[in-house]
Amino acid sequence: MKRMRTLAGISILALVLAACSSGSSDTAADTAAALDDSNCAAAESFCVGLVTDIGKVDDKSFNQSAHEGAMAAAAEVGGFYKYIETTDTKDYAANMGQFTDKSYDVIVTVGFLMAEATVTAAKANPNTKFIGVDQFQAEEVANLTGLIFPEDQAGYGAGYLAGLMTKTNKIGSVLGLEIAPVQLFAKGFEAGAKAANPKVAVTTVYHPPADNGFGDPVWGAAEAKKQLAQGADIIFGAGGGTGNGALAEIAKAEGAGTAVFCIGVDTDQWFTVPEAQPCLITSAVKGLTEGTTGLVKKAFDGSIAGGNFVGSAGISDYHDFASVVPMDVQDKVAGVVAGLKDGSIKTGVTL
Amino acid sequence: MLDFIKDNRKPVITLGLVTVIAYVFYFLDEIKTTSVLVFGWGYAVPLVLAAMVGIIGERTGVVNIGIEGQMLMSAFASFFGSVITGNIYIGMLIGIAAGLIMGGFLAVAAVKWEMDQIIAGVVINIVAAGLTSFFYAPGKTLPQLVPVVSIPILSDIPLIGPVFFRNGIFALATLFIVLAVNFAIFKTRWGLRSRSVGEYPSAADAAGINVTRVRMMNVTLAGALAGCAGAFLALEAAGTFARGLTAGRGFLALAIMIFGAWNPLGALAAALFFGISTAIASQLQADEVINIPQQFVNLLPFVMTLIVLSVAVGRVRPPAAAGQPYTKEG
């Protein structure tokens, strides 16, 4: 009997730990502004809730960026902020429900995969403003704003740099799942590289369709190793943990930082993936944090509109590679990035 | 030697055929063939090691579905062990020790306490997922790289050398581990006793074998192999730790165990088959040789597994007492 009780104890402990690290109970509050979310329905209080896609707010990638943006905006306007980390795609609706039940003013949902669930929730709760990060809105819902980015422009800038920097005329990309934002990055990368250097060959490989498409660093590392062996000297790692695995592998390769380089994605990965620093010349970034902050503040002053809101995208700082990338290459890339922004250069990417 | 070939005609012919095909491709494109096979073997290593854990367990009568959790825990322990101590070799030992502890937990729960083996395995998976994501700290890097070792002479063989004999420590050890497990199960007294415990425990008991002790020992020691698989994933394959790093490889290993008919060499072949077809899928995507969506190309390993399994079904049989706790009568 005693051992059964011990076993039951261990099982409960396990469940508690699993629950703590996942989903619903793992929440944090910005206590500086408001103390709790009991009176979100009141007009003077402003409550912001954020639901992550599968992943954590410390994922070094898009969940973290959106989380930081929403938190900063809530603090700035004196609102209350709380987040929920999703651990199962089936919980999207339930996690949003935790916020709508308490009449939150703004709900931020992060990630392309949550688009459909967000539309459903927005239609069911017309008085709540929804912000869908990375979610393109095909039809307009009045209280739902999709924060989208011209990923193809960021990819194009990075590809242009890669096309000018490659010595072997072979570059590659190690990607997460084949979904719209990733495809835009990849196609933009290829278009940019070809525009800079018509002789360049671009290898594009997506992770096999699976639940772990963005969380398989082992596969990413193996794929990067294979592309390096086949002569690629610049590799674009775009796909959450999978891409980070590729970056880390390239950083270990022979000639990393002198003959072999890697390019990160979403955020400036110089800071978020320190193990990639030996090879990371730049990252193709989208302004997730500033975009989220801007939209939450627009929701606060009431100027937010339904439909799509296009954020910014580009490439990040060169950091230690500012001395490695030749000055004329830096100038050309800066010109292209500026041209993309003012519309004088088109990426020509379509899905 | 001739007798051996006569007894194992099919495997020998298959091996010969595969080798010839591999060298034909090697002749056509040296770099591509080598790098695809390097990818394939790297993919297969953790699957083979994890399949050994399953084989040793089931051959002794204990079903282990907690391999995924054992590997995850070991990957976590080896990575953070390396980070904290500043030495990857100590980290490797910590990873193997974590595997042993997880193996010991399964042994105590499933053998000593006679708990339902499936539930014990599930508990391991949940505990591992919970602990590793709760205590995970981002932004840590390994203090040094895992050195790549080349075995003299063998590593100079074209194709086979760079694929199998120029690797990190765990990947190199895997081939020898498989051979050793195969020898131990089929040619030693320990193996005979283990198999008898897995097939017909009451008869083994009557013959004077301590069923509980054999099972406890085997399940615990198999945990060390799960430790090797986890340490390989974190230190050699990814060079980092991420939540859910094992990504279902522990479950895939169970399929490979069945695919290999509970036989270590069979599991090696099955894992290589799976690894290489995954590598070929990614290479087909990279080369764009056939203009079909990558989702279909990436189905390749799974479809091939399905076909082979459906052909093999009915011919393989699990150890008779796998999954049944043994209670001594009287």
Image (spheres, coloured by chain):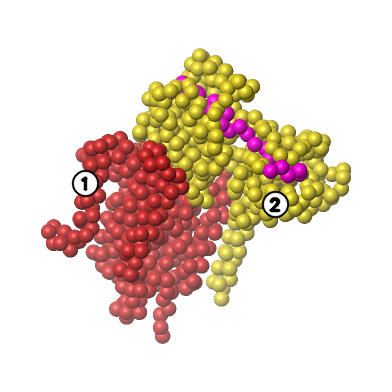
Chain colours: A yellow, B red
| 3D distance between C-alphas at marks 1 and 2 | 57 Å
Q: Give, as a three-letter code, the residue at label 2.
A: Thr
**Which chain contains the residue that carries disc 2?**
A
Residue name at image x 76 percent, y 38 percent: A305
- Residue B100 placed where, x, y %? 43, 57
B124 with respect to A223 (left or right): right
**Which chain contains the residue that carries disc 1?**
B
Q: Residue furthest bottom?
A: B330
Q: Please give the residue where the numbered disc 1 appears in the rendered image.
A: B20
Residue name at image x 43 percent, y 49 percent: B296
Q: What span is in magenta?
A: A139-165
- Residue B220 placed where, x, y %? 41, 62
Mark drawn on residue A120: 2
Foreground of the two, B136 or A140? A140
Q: Give, as a three-letter code, the residue at label 1.
A: Val
Which secondary structure, mark 1? helix
Residue B282 quadrant: top left
